[in-house]
Image (cartoon, rainbow, N blue to C red):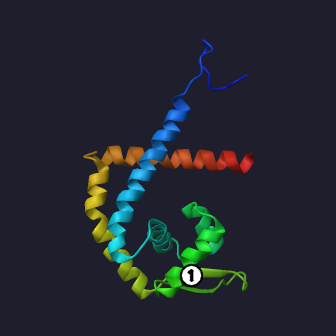
Amino acid sequence: MLTNQPDDGAPDHRIGRLGLAIRRAEHAVSGSLGTALRELDLTVTQYGTLLVLAQSPGLSGAQLARVCQVTPQSMASVLARLVERGLIARSPSPVHQKVLVARLSRTGWSVLRKADRLLQPTQRHLSGGLAEQDQATLLGYLERIVDRLGTDQATA
């Protein structure tokens, strides 16, 4: 028995539509961010990695891959490029010497600040005139979706 069918037996496509709408929004946002970030020779994933490291320094490549929603192999490439550009430094973890953790370098902090300034118009446009409370509500809903689906996938 299908669980997302209304009582009249007709298929309920709202869940698929919600997923498609979120995917379309993600593509639109990534495209806008990517265009703006080209000026700094950053990809959206590289920028996201810098943001995560600014908030949570000392994460491993595997941890960053999970947070940034990319494969460990993709994150290894992202980290290698960021190290090559001098934007991050990697060092052995104090907990496990074979695991490398990453931190923003002084140059990385500088590039992240430049990127944030560069993205301000994009962020204003993205908010689409939403009031701060509406933005907070939307962000809360999106975080709940991520948390729920992450939990579902962990138990599947």
User: Does the image show residue 103?
Assistant: no
In percent of width and height, residue 137 lies at 40, 44
Q: In the displayed structure, does residue 93 sit left or right of residue 120?
A: right
In percent of width and height, residue 2 lies at 69, 24
Q: Nearer the viewer, residue 138 or 108?
A: 108
Of all residues, the one furthest to the top in this rendering is 8
Q: Amino acid at mark 1?
A: Ala
Where does label 1 land, which residue? Answer: 80
Residue shown at 61%/63% (left/top)? Answer: 66
| Quarter containing the C terminus | top right
Q: Nearer the viewer, residue 143 or 17?
A: 17
Residue 79 is drawn in which quadrant?
bottom right
User: Does the image show residue 107?
Assistant: yes
Q: Residues within 10 Å of mark 1 (few under 14, many from 20)?
A: some
The kind of secondary structure element at disc 1 is helix
In percent of width and height, residue 129 lies at 25, 46
Q: In the displayed structure, does residue 107 sit left or right of residue 147?
A: left
Q: Nearer the viewer, residue 73 or 148?
A: 73
In percent of width and height, residue 154 lies at 71, 51
Residue shown at 58%/69% (left/top)? Answer: 64
Residue shown at 63%/14% (left/top)? Answer: 9
